[in-house]
Amino acid sequence: MLIMRHELLLVAILVILLLVEIFLPEKHKHRIIPLAIILMGVVTALGFIPGPTGSLFGGMYSTSNLVLIMKNILNIGTLVIFIQSAEWLKKDENREKISEYFIVLLSSLIGMFYMISSGDFLMFYLGLELATIPVAAAAAFERFKEKSAEAGVKLIFMSALSSGILLYGISMIYGTIGTMYFQDVAPKFTGSSLQVIAFIFFFAGMAFKISLVPFHLWAADVYEGAPINVTSYLSVVSKGAAVFILMILLYTVFTKIALMWRDVVYIIAILTMTVGNLFAMRQRNIKRFLAFSSISQAGFILLGIIGQSQLGMTTVIYFVLIYLFSNLGAFGVATAISNKTGKETIDDYDGFYRTNPLLSLAMMLSLFSLAGIPPLAGFFGKFFLFTAAAKQGLFILIVIAVLNTIISLYYYLLVIKAMFLNKSDQPIAYFKSDFYTRLGLLICSAGIIIIGFASPIYEWILQLSHGLIY
Amino acid sequence: MSAESLILFFIVGAFLVGVAVLFSSYVPPKSSNPQKFEPYECGIPTEGLTWLQFNVGYYMFSIIYLVFDVETIFLFPWAEVMKETGMRGFIEIVIFFFILGVGLLYAWKKGALKWE
């Protein structure tokens, strides 16, 4: 029971929210928002309490301390997204489906947890589907808006396609080895031709989920159409979970063909960083802009995965934690502006600093952190990723990554320039953001500033990452 | 790892599919009449547009049916081993029923059981 506590707690609050939705009278529906946030906060806090780890169901489910950190990170991300969604959910058109929003995201989070701590390809696949399908429902949340419905349909089709490819890969793995358990597959996965095809299919399926180039084309449309909070969920929590499980599988299951997958990851990392950056430069819509920026960030994450060492694993988790706060900070400001004014293009941000200085500062912090400017956390995250790659002697890759960082600085600064320097005849008028928006941005800004300096967090992850490679 | 067999795999795969498609487009005798391009409707000439709206009310029932379906699937194995699992198994199945029951209640509350 206690080994599965993260999942069980989430199931518990999911059932509580359902019961509240059933028995709460219609006029008190808005009370569900604080209730859900508080419950999620409690679950997030409880998740940090150390407890037993191990495996259940004959090895189909297994956790280690490192997996628990990943789950806690995802919990924090979901909590911040819940806080940021509050203002949007209070709108009249969303009133009657407040609890559904939370339930859908929570069930997807449960799926991710099962996916991360799976010990078996079947369990992994079940978790993956449970993680993907509810998000498609969430993307189509504003179903009377054409773009939102389109985003939902696109997401469900793309994930069906990628799941199909991934399943084909898994079936080949089963065909060549005759078992689905990670521990039994690992020693026998030696790289015969069919296993190579299996790996390529499997990797392509996962690359769809993380939106790596050349499987990234769905991302921009879905990110633009979905409600902005769902977009931030997709770009932070979904992507984080998929990166985690890909890393775990590459390190534990595909160890014997490490030389091969390193080349694959190497090329895809370069492609993802460069293409993501080049496309991000051209975007005028802030959601599309953040979508491509998150694609290129995923390329940087691959740099840590390629390190294939304890250091690499630690840096990836550390970077995802930082990326979570930075990206959610940027999305938080974009959400606040979109909620109050409905404006979503970068040109609308002209002169934003004069009218709303605090929000502009929060946005600046997040974008600087995403770009990797010291002394913010994003710099340390990227620096450690480069270190992990340098340990493997991949200097050409690092040079390309540094060049990409400089390119990315250009377009992050474009947004900041729009807010701080550009003058506009009709800037966005001053508005007072509500308590939830402020709380969300405060958490993100604090995270961005503190995590960079708090070496205990890094040391803690490093110390726990001994356990994973078995 | 032998790259030759990989390449062979793809060549043979593409070849087989290509041959099947080409074969079926060249070999059979061809005859064309306007009826061939209409949707098949039991042999009767089609009437009106195919873009008709029709009632999708049944999908709700099939989803709710799933609740009972899953319930039954899990009930049988539990009944089989009820004596061995004892109290613990009983409590677990009760929790399971509780969650399914909440789902049904939710559907009821949202008016999914009404036929409109």
Image: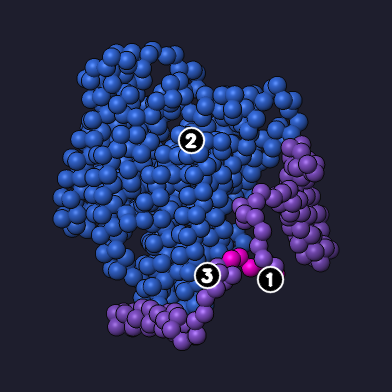
Q: Residue furthest front?
A: B33
Residue A50 vertical placement versus A175 (above, below) = above
Could you say where residue B27 lies in the image, as x and y percent from the top left? 46, 87
Q: Amino acid at mark 2?
A: Pro
Is the Cβ of the residue at disc 3 closer than 8 Å to that at disc 2? no
Chain in purple, by letter, is B
Q: Residues within 10 Å of mark 1 (few under 14, many from 20)?
A: few
**Residue labelled with disc 1:** B43
Write down the quadrant of residue A11 in the picture: top right
The chain under label 2 reads A
Q: Secondary structure at mark 2?
A: loop
**Residue labelled with disc 3:** A180
Task: Report if residue A197 is visible in the image.
Answer: yes
- Visual hue assigned to chain A: blue
Residue at position x 25%, y 60% from top? A267
Q: In this image, A188 relative to A181: left or right?
A: left
Q: Residues within 10 Å of mark 2 (few under 14, many from 20)?
A: many
Label 3 in the same subunit as label 1: no
Q: Secondary structure at mark 1?
A: loop
- Residue B39 magenta: yes
Which residues are drawn in magenta? Answer: B38-42
